[in-house]
Amino acid sequence: MPDASITTVPVPLGDRAYEIYVGRGLLQEAGQRIAALGARAAAIVTDEHVGPLYADILARSLQQHGLRTSVVTVPAGEATKCYAFLETVCDAVLEARIERGDLVVALGGGVVGDLAGFAAAVVRRGVRFVQVPTTLLSQVDSSVGGKTGINSRHGKNLVGAFHQPSLVLADTALLDTLPLREMRAGYAEVVKYGLIDDAAFFAWCEKNWQGVFAGGPERNEAVAQSCRAKAAVVVRDEREDGDRALLNLGHTFGHALERITHYNSARLVHGEGVAIGLCLAFRFSASLGLCPVADAERVEAHLSAAGLPTRLNQVAGGCGTVEDLLDAMAQDKKVKGGALTFILASGIGKSFIAPGISVDSVRAFLKDENSA
Amino acid sequence: MPDASITTVPVPLGDRAYEIYVGRGLLQEAGQRIAALGARAAAIVTDEHVGPLYADILARSLQQHGLRTSVVTVPAGEATKCYAFLETVCDAVLEARIERGDLVVALGGGVVGDLAGFAAAVVRRGVRFVQVPTTLLSQVDSSVGGKTGINSRHGKNLVGAFHQPSLVLADTALLDTLPLREMRAGYAEVVKYGLIDDAAFFAWCEKNWQGVFAGGPERNEAVAQSCRAKAAVVVRDEREDGDRALLNLGHTFGHALERITHYNSARLVHGEGVAIGLCLAFRFSASLGLCPVADAERVEAHLSAAGLPTRLNQVAGGCGTVEDLLDAMAQDKKVKGGALTFILASGIGKSFIAPGISVDSVRAFLKDENSA
Ligand SMILES: NC(=O)c1ccc[n+]([C@@H]2O[C@H](COP(=O)([O-])OP(=O)(O)OC[C@H]3O[C@@H](n4cnc5c(N)ncnc54)[C@H](O)[C@@H]3O)[C@@H](O)[C@H]2O)c1
Ligand SMILES: NC(=O)c1ccc[n+]([C@@H]2O[C@H](COP(=O)([O-])OP(=O)(O)OC[C@H]3O[C@@H](n4cnc5c(N)ncnc54)[C@H](O)[C@@H]3O)[C@@H](O)[C@H]2O)c1
C-alpha cells in the first residue's frame, strides 16, 4: 500500500546532483520517477533472491511509463562482485541496447548496486544509473555516494569507478522480506552515523531501534537521516581525499575481520564486522585515554541490544591470532607507509581521523581484547 | 642518439591538463619527465613485441629516477583488449602496489594504451597514467584524448572510461622498428587530420610523406601537427558529445570493414580500414554532389602513393555483399534511431557531421563501389 509520506534527501553535487527518495511504496511508482529522467530504455540488474520478489513489479512500472525494459539476474552474494560478472552485466546491458541517454537500474543490495553501478560507469564509457536499494545497508550506505566497483584477489573494492547515480529510490517496505541478520547488519551502519558526529541521532537510535526493525515510521526516519548524514560527507569530499574517511569508522577492524573470515557470509557479514569494529574503535579510543569508557560501553550495549556481535570471540569459527588480525589490517588500502590510519573517537558523536597509529599500540590493545 | 629537438604540445583540459612531448630519444630520458609527476612507483604495461625491444630501457630510466618499477607483458594484437586481460593488468598493477599517487605506464601501440589506460581508470577507482605510444597510430591518435577501453562481444571499444593521461611521450625513434604495414596504417590517421579541417597540412603530407616514413624531421613534424589537431578537437569536446565526432571521418565505413573481416589483422588493420573509409567518405560526398570529384581523386592518389588500400576490392578475402556492409554499419554505435550519421566533406579540409543519411543512398553508393 503506497504511503504518502515520502521523504526527499537532496545530494547537491553540482552537475552530478541527484535526489534520494525514502518511504514505503516507492517501487510500485518507480516508473514515474525514473521515466522523468528522460531515458528510452532501462536494463534492470538484480540478484536471484531479490529478482523473484520485486523485478516484475519494477519492470511493469517502467513499462507503464514507456520504458523498454530488460532484466539480468546475477547470483546473490559477495562473490558476484568480480570481473566475470562485470562482463556478464556489461554484455547484458549492451545486449539490451542501452545507449548514452538510457539507464541501468540496480535492484538489490550493495552487491548488486556496486556491480551494476560499475557496469554503468564503463558501458559506452558511462551511462546513467538508478539505485533501487533493497537492503538496509544499501539504503543507508552503499547506494549513496557514487562509489562502485568489484573485488580483486588483492582485496575488496579495489577495482571500480566513482559514478554517481541519477536517482535513488529507497523503498523501506522492501526491507520487510529482508532476513533479520541482514537487517541487523545494515543497522550497524545506521548507528555508525550517530557515532561519527551526531550524538542526538545515536540517542534517538537507542530509543527507537525497535521501530526501525518493525517497519514503522521510525524506519523511514532512520533511513532518511542516515542518507542525509552520508550525503553531507560525500558532498564535502566526493572522491574520498579527506573527510570522507570518517565514514570508515569501525571499518579498519571490520574489514580485517571480513578478510580473516574469507568474506564467508556464513561466518560474518559486512555489517557484523562493522558492529564489532565500532566497538573496537571505541574501546581502543578509550584504552588510549581519548574517550570515556562509559561511551564505549554505551556503544556496545546498544549494538548488543539490537542483536549485533560486539566482541572478537563472537566471530563464528574464531578470528585467529592477534598477528593474523594485524596482517589483515596491514593489507587494507587505508594503510600508508607502514603506519595505520584509524578513525577514533573522543566520545559518542565525536570521531576523528587519526593517522600514524603505531602498530605496537594496536597489538597491545588487541591482545587484551582477544583474551577478554 | 637523443635529439635536442623535442616539440611540446599542450592539452589544456583544466585540472586534467597535460603535455605531449614529441621527438627522437624521449624513451631514454623518460625517467626524468615521469619522475617529475611525483609518483613513487610505476607499473609498465607492454606487449610481447614491444617489451623485448624497449621495456628495459624504460624501466632502467625510471629506476634511475627513483621509481619502483614493474613490468606486465600482454600478448600483441586486438584480441588482448578484452575483459580477461583487463583483469590480468588490474591485478598486476595491484600486485605492484600502485597506490593513488602512483602511475601506470602504457608502453606500446593503441591496444596497450587503451587497455592499460582503462586499467588505470579503474584500479583503486583511478590512478594516474602515462602514455609512451610506440606505433604511429598511437602517437598521432589513440594516446591523446583520454578514451580508454576494451572490446565486448557486441562491438569494439564498447566498455571503457574517459581517463586522461598525465603525460604522453611520443618517441618517434621507436617507429624505426615498426613494421611498414603498421606505419602505413598509422599514416592514414595523419592524413585524416588534413582532410578534416586543414587543407594546408594535407598538401604538406603530399609533399613530405616519404620523410615521415624515413624518420627524418618530417616525422616529428607530422606527429606533432597531428597531436595538435587531435588535442584541439578534444579540448572542444572532451566527452564526445559533439564536435569530436569529426575525428570519425572515414571511420563509419572503416569500422564496418573491420567488423566484416572479423578484426583479423591478417586481412585488414584499423588504419587500412580508415584509408579505404576516407576514400569512400570523399567519393560518397562527391556522389551526393557535395564535394568536387577532383578532391576525392586527390585523396585516393595520396593514400595509394603511401601504399594504403583505397578500394573495397583491396580487402583481403573480400568484404561481402553491400547488405553485409550495411548490416555492419547499422551495428556501429554511431547509428541513432535507424538513420546513419556520417562524417562527409565538401572538399579537402572541409568535413562536417551529416546526421540522418538515408540507408538507401548509402546502398546505392556502395553498389557502385562494389562493382567498380
Ligand atoms: N559503494 C559503497 O559505498 C558501499 C558502502 C558499503 C558497503 N558496500 C558494499 O555493499 C555490499 C554489501 O551490501 P548488502 O549488505 O546489501 O549485501 P547483499 O547485496 O549481498 O544483500 C544481502 C542479502 O540479502 C538479499 N536481499 C537483498 N534485498 C533483499 C530483500 N529486500 N528481501 C530479501 N532478501 C534480500 C540478497 O540477495 C543477499 O543475499 C558489500 O559488497 C560492500 O562492499 C558498498
Ligand atoms: N583510444 C583512442 O582514442 C583510439 C583511437 C584510435 C585507435 N584506437 C585503438 O588503437 C588500437 C590500434 O592501435 P595500433 O594500431 O597501435 O595497434 P597495436 O597496439 O596492435 O600495434 C600494432 C602492432 O605493432 C606492434 N608494435 C607496436 N609498437 C612497435 C614498435 N615500436 N616496433 C615494433 N612493433 C611494434 C604491436 O606489438 C602490434 O603487433 C585499436 O584497438 C583501436 O581501437 C584507440
Image: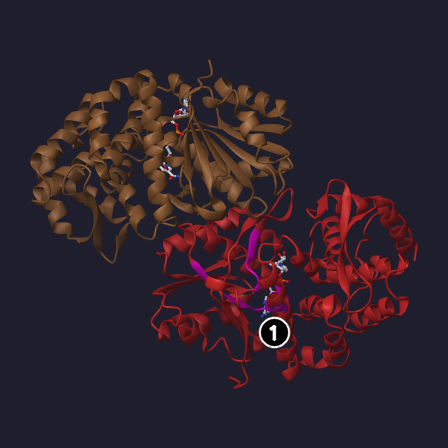
Chain colours: A red, B brown
Q: Is residue B301 above or below residue B150?
A: above
Q: Position of residue B318 (x, y in %)?
A: 20, 31
In the image, is the residue at mark 1 within 8 Å of ligand 1 by its beta carbon? Answer: yes
Q: Residue furthest top?
A: B1
Q: Residue furthest front?
A: B4
* Residue in the foreground of this view, choosing between B311 and B23: B23
Identify the residue at horizontal 76%, vertical 60% (top origin). Answer: A352
Observer able to see residue B107: yes
Left or right, B367 with respect to A312, comes to left
Q: Is residue A262 above or below residue A185?
A: above
In this figure, which residue is indicated by the disc labeled 1?
A175
Q: Is residue A316 above or below residue B264?
A: below
Assess disc 1: are there few (<14), some (14-19) or many (≥20) residues with their C-alpha within 10 Å of its C-alpha. Answer: many
Q: Position of residue B170 (x, y in %)?
A: 43, 27
Q: Which residues are magenta?
A: A128-149
* Residue in the foreground of this view, choosing between B97 and B156: B97
Q: Position of residue B222 (x, y in %)?
A: 31, 27
> Does A366 lie within the magenta span?
no
* Residue in the foreground of this view, choosing between A149 and B43: B43
Q: Is residue A215 above or below residue B283?
A: below
Asked which quadrant contains residue A250, the reply is bottom right
Q: Position of residue B19 (x, y in %)?
A: 45, 36
Q: Amino acid at mark 1?
A: Leu
Observer able to see residue A105: no
Q: Which chain is indicated by disc 1?
A: A
Please tell me in which quarter of the rendered image ligand 1 is found. bottom right
Left or right, A261 with respect to B40, comes to right
Asked which quadrant contains residue A348, the reply is bottom right
